[in-house]
Amino acid sequence: MLRESVCVVGLGGIGHAMASRLDERGWTVVGVEPDDGRRTAWLESGARTAHRDLGSVDWSGIGHLVVAVRTEEQVTQVLAACAAAPTSLRILLVSTVRPSFWRRPLPAPLELGRVVECPVSGGERPARDGTVAMYAAGWREEEDGALLADLSDSIVTLPRHGDPALVKLVNNTLAAYNAANAARCLEFVTSQGVAGEDFLRALGRGSGRSHASAILHLLSRNQLELLEKDVRLLREDHPQAPRPAEPAELADLVASALGEIADPAAVV
């Protein structure tokens, strides 16, 4: 059964994947993408609609706008263009912005209550499958629940706009550290004559394993560059953000970080 229309602006990796997912789940999807190649790829993937810019969109029947552009500047431009949309339009901001973005007023006449901040973690394939992790603030079950449920099967709800951005950026910063450390260790092991495939198999069964190390050989250059971008965004807002820690006094460091949520009785 067809549902309401959804406009997806930004048909790059994540945006195209989410638009395709929604199309399969019965939503009428209108794509917006200034890049001719991406717009053509979207049109060639099925009988769908695509526009070069938001000014060409007929807003009648469109209940949600999913924003999946790459930069914070592009996010600001998209939100400003929403001034022409009806006030009933709900906006899902999948793009990652800095936490400080939410300390500035939104372009008039937008109100914070109309915008769901919901950056995702997981990459293009999980976005296509609806299995990305999503960090969400400002969503309403009645208006947004069905759409979010089709986009993600793992939603972490947070109380304030800006919290999802901070959690996503710190999560991806940690992933970037893990990927970089795994790559450095891989270089060292192979320099000692051990086959890289053997080390990765051993790492996959050992205590040094992380999600980033487990999929290191599957990550595209674009995904790795996005991790780098998120590290940069976090440091721009929070220069004091954690950097790789030396393992000196490791037990004390972990205990202090965990505080009351530590569970020393558990055995892993």
Image (tube, grey):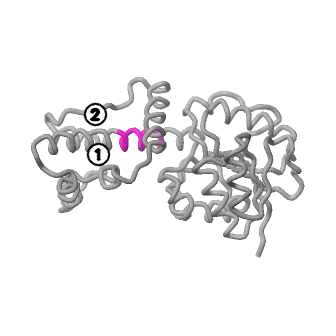
Q: Residue 267 versus residue 35: which sits nearer the camera?
A: 35
133 horizontally vs 16: left or right? left
Are the residues at dot 1 and dot 2 in contact (C-beta closer than 8 Å)?
no
Q: Earlier in the sequence, mark 1 or mark 2?
A: 2
Whether residue 87 is situated above or below residue 18 in the rendered picture: above
- Please give the range of residues in magenta: 168-176
Q: Residue 87 versus residue 200: which sits nearer the camera?
A: 200
Q: Main secondary structure of the magenta part?
A: helix
- Percent across and percent down for residue 200 are 23, 54
Residue at label 1? 258
- Percent across and percent down for residue 230 are 47, 36
- Sort mark 2 into few (<14), some (14-19) or many (20+) by Cα contacts within 10 Å: few
- Mark toward the viewer: 1 or 2: 2
Examine the image and state in which quarter residue 145 appears.
Answer: bottom right
Residue type, mark 2 in image: Pro
- Count of numbered labels shown in the rendering: 2
- Percent across and percent down for residue 169 are 46, 39
Q: Give the residue drawn at x 84%, y 37%.
A: 83
Q: Give the residue drawn at x 48%, y 24%.
A: 236
Q: Give the residue drawn at x 62%, y 45%.
A: 117
Whether residue 6 is situated above or below residue 54 in the rendered picture: below
Residue type, mark 1 in image: Leu
